Each structure stands twice: as structure tokens, then as C-alpha cells.
Amino acid sequence: MKISDINIRDPFVLRRGDKYFLYGTRAAGFGKNTGGFDVYESEDLENWSEPKVCFDSAQYGLNREVNWAPEVHLYGGAFYMFATFTKEDEMRGVYILRSETPKGPFTPYSQSAVTPDGWECLDGTLYISKKGEPYLVFCHEHTQIIDGTVCYLKLSEDLKKAVSEPVYMFSGSSPEWADKKPEGEHYITDGPFMYRTVGGRLIMIWSTFIGGKYAQCVAVSDNDEIDGKFIHLDPLITDDGGHGMIFEFADKLMLTFHSPNITGSERPVFRELEDTGDSIRLK
């Protein structure tokens, strides 16, 4: 099937040699009660295999509502999926799943959600520090706190649980270019992803809404580590595309994101990036 035939949100690509594995949120019903996730396989980013179920959320009691934003990382010789599900307390949380192969099947691995109890959270991503320590970067939902935030916490070396309290990074209202809204109106944060440039700078891409349109944003750490202050640069995309991630395709650096942000119409989009050493920009 062609990439234009794939209807998912929150696309994530894992490269293994000359193979590319694509994951995402099943777009039907905005990814609610969809029963899990699929994986697609390609060698050229245009022609893809038919979807194969890689995680059955109903089998493990995780199809209570949202099945969102799966991303897969190779860590310690196994493949770990970070995904958002609705917890038993009806709040959203990030769980970690595990498989021996990128095709799955994935099975629950973490001790329930690794995001804080009592918090409405989503869109967890793995970050490995310069010291080799694993961290979870995630969003504290605007649905609970009005002005959504991006936070991080440290994970145990085996990724089974959080071993620190959450640390605030920034809010949806933080950038100078953020919409100025009346008190009580919501600021959305979602889709964080960490990338280190060829110059050693640590950047985060993340998404929000600017002028009512979904946007792909970028920020850079002032000390090139996760505990630095993140300085917001000009957004990459402001015309209804977001929740992206960065990967390598052959000798190219690529950004994938979904667009448009309309339920039933979302498709993965690929755009080539340039790594400037200090940051990234669209080619």
C-alpha cells in the first residue's frame, strides 16, 4: 500500500538496517477504543506492507479508552514501545511495552503507567542522557491543568518504573510566539521528541496550536542536557501538521508528522530536514 493510504495519527518510524517500521495511532474515533496498534514495513517510505497488529490492547485490559502515540525504541537488546492508555482511574498515562522484534507482539512491561499517579498524561518518549541514563519526557495534559506542560522523570535502568519525581520543563504558554489567550483558556502540549544535532545540541520537537492550526515546534536546551532551560525557536510547521519525530532515511535526515489534523483524514507526511549543528530546519 502507498503511504497516502495509511490513516494514522502520531506517526513514528524505526529504522533497522534498510527496513523501516511505521507505528501510529489508529485514526478511527480519534484513537479511542481502537484495540491497539499496527506496524507497517517499508524499504522506500512510499510503498508499505499491509498493517500487522503488533499490540492487542484489549487482551491486556488496556482498551478502556485512548490508545495513543506508540513509539518504539531499541534499548538493551530489546524493543520497547511507549504508548498512552486510559488508566483504571480514568486518567491517561504512559505505559511501556516490550518485544523481542520490531514487529511485535508487544506485551506490557512497566509496572502500570510510569507517569505520576493523579496526573493526566500522554505522549511519552524515551531520552538517553550523555551518561547513558534513561528518562521519560511526557506531557501533563491541559485537560487537567489548563496550561499544558512538558515534563521529564528518570526511569530505572530496566525501564520498569519511574525513579524520580517529575520535573517541569515548560508550558504551552511559554514561547514568545504562543497565542495570547484569556485566563482559563487552554494551551495544548503534545508529541515531544528529543534529538541531538551533529553539533551536540539537544533539541526537542513538540506540538501545539498556533492561530487555531496544529503546529510543529522546536526548542533547544541551553546546556545541551535534559535539565537545561529550553529556548523556543521559530516553529517548523504552522499549517496544520504536527506530532512529529526525526529519523534517518539512507543519508537523509527526515521529519515525519501527521497532517491534516482532522479525524479520518490524517496521513503520515515525510519532509527532509537539515541539521545545522545548532538546530534543525526544513530543506
Image (cartoon, rainbow, N blue to C red):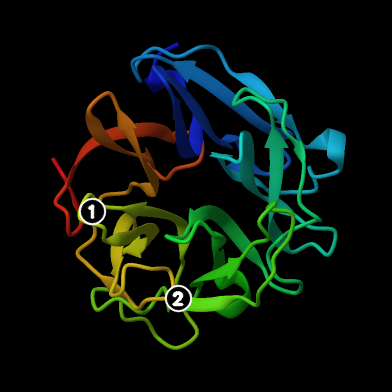
The front one of 214 and 86 is: 86
CA–CA distance between discs 1 and 2? 20 Å
Where residue 104 appears, as percent x and y from the top left, is 68, 25
Image quarter of residue 44: top left
Estimate how packed mark 1 is, as few (under 14), some (14 to 19) or many (20 or more) residues with alpha carbons within 10 Å. some
**Left or right side of 165 for 264:** left
Location of residue 22 with respect to 84 vertically, above or below: above
- Kindly identify the residue that appears in the image at 82 percent across and 36 percent down: 58
Locate the N terminus by quadrant.
top left
Mark 1 touching mark 2, by CB under 8 A? no
Task: Check residue 236 in the rendering and tell me which mark sits there, or answer none.
Answer: 1
Circle 1 — which element?
loop
| Nearer mark to the viewer, of 1 and 2 | 2
Q: Which residue is mark 2?
A: 169
Where residue 118 appears, as percent x and y from the top left, is 75, 74
The front one of 100 and 30 is: 100
Residue type at the position of mark 2: Met
Circle 2 — which element?
strand
Estimate how packed mark 2 is, as few (under 14), some (14 to 19) or many (20 or more) residues with alpha carbons within 10 Å. some
